[in-house]
Amino acid sequence: MERSSVTHLQELLELFPVVAVLGPRQCGKTTLLKTVAQDGWKHFDLERQADRHRIAADPDLFLRMESGRLAIDEAQELPELFPALRVAVDADRGANGRFLLTGSVSPSLIKSLHESLAGRMAVLELGPFTAAEAHQESSTPFALALHSLDACLELQPRVTLEQIHDSWLRGGFPEPWLKNQARHGQLWHENYLRSLLDRDLPRLVPGLNHRRFRSFLQLLAGVSGEILNQSDLARAVGVTQPTIRDWLALADGTYLWRHLTAWDRHPTKRLVKHPKGHLRDSGILHHLLRIRDRDELLAHPRMGSLWEGFVVEQILRQLAHAGEAVQAFHYRTGAGAEIDLVLQGAFGIVPVEIKYAETGDPRKWRALRDFVAEQDCAFGILLDNGAKVRRLDERIVAIPATHL
């Protein structure tokens, strides 16, 4: 399956000496690396002992001897490599596309990379499949359409309603899609979580109580898509509030959790300052909630919040794969007016309200219309399950989720 990030990755390799592809384990980073880094590239995997020992013995010497283009998988396994990469890059600053790295499951990895390779490196965040990618659609039209209301009005369907509901239920990790068996998907998600909790996270946080952290993830599944109160989470898990803060940072840094800060830029209205978030992969989320099929999903009492998190993730993954640098927020006033996602980037500020059902009732998107007027946005988006793109008023457009 071709990834929507291929074009942007090739662009970054033309512009930077080092490119790092970061994301959760098993999301397709190695496959992407092998797809892009073919003729003329040498490949090394730092989870393979022979490769790791060869590089770790003397990273500077290794890079002097291997003067060609190098693709290095799971770079977080050898932080000593990063200073050596800086020396190698500075020895020939005019040569771009020399090093392609992948990395996962390490909140400190990006910090280490930037400290060692500031100005020499670009980062591409790769997530699991979007619904469109899972169904053989690798372009990123929605990311481009955010620059223009007219472009939004021209968007066309990319998947069917059946396909997007299938993707919502199953999540986006490639392996269950390639096997395409319901029982395999259930077992895969459980073993993925076990591997993360038993192996990866304890390596990052020695002494982490993985059973209690599993309870914490179960609790996060129950509040996915909701405003977070860290005091309530701490009481529920039986740990201190600083521990909850650290665990949220760990979940976010290991690509399990998507942290959304509150939009706080309003001259007059009192705004809710608490953050919001959701488990990034809907397949992992539904596994933790024991949702097995579509009937159970659609009957779930928090179905609307589950749908909201899924759609937010579809949007943010597509933007990352397209190379659109954005900041993402949620918005809620003290009076209860709410917008699910506020995007800020080169296109300006675009608020996005997410509804499962198609609606033509202006009361359902009053907060969106008010935000557009108060922040002087070019336009706002209502994302729903309508049959086609509709213009709701002068600066509000409704876009079906099938068009993402």
Image (tube, grey):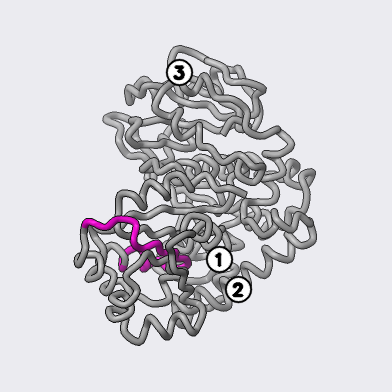
Q: Is residue 17 visible?
A: yes
Q: Which mark is residue 195?
A: 2
Instruction: Determine crowd level at label 1: few under 14, some 14-19, many 20+ residues with C-alpha closer than 10 A.
Output: many
Residue shown at 39%/23% (left/top)?
Answer: 372
Sequence-first tag of 2 and 1: 2
Q: Residue beneath label 1, please?
A: 216
- Apparent side of residue 105 relative to residue 384 in the rendered image (left or right): left
Sequence-first tag of 3 and 1: 3
Q: Is residue 161 magenta?
A: no
| Marks 3 and 1, how far apart at CA | 44 Å
The residue sitting at the top extreme is: 394
Q: Residue beneath label 3, please?
A: 150
Dot 2 falls on a residue whose secondary structure is helix
User: What amino acid type is highlighted by mark number 1?
Assistant: Phe
User: What amino acid type is highlighted by mark number 2?
Assistant: Ser
User: What amino acid type is highlighted by mark number 3?
Assistant: Asp
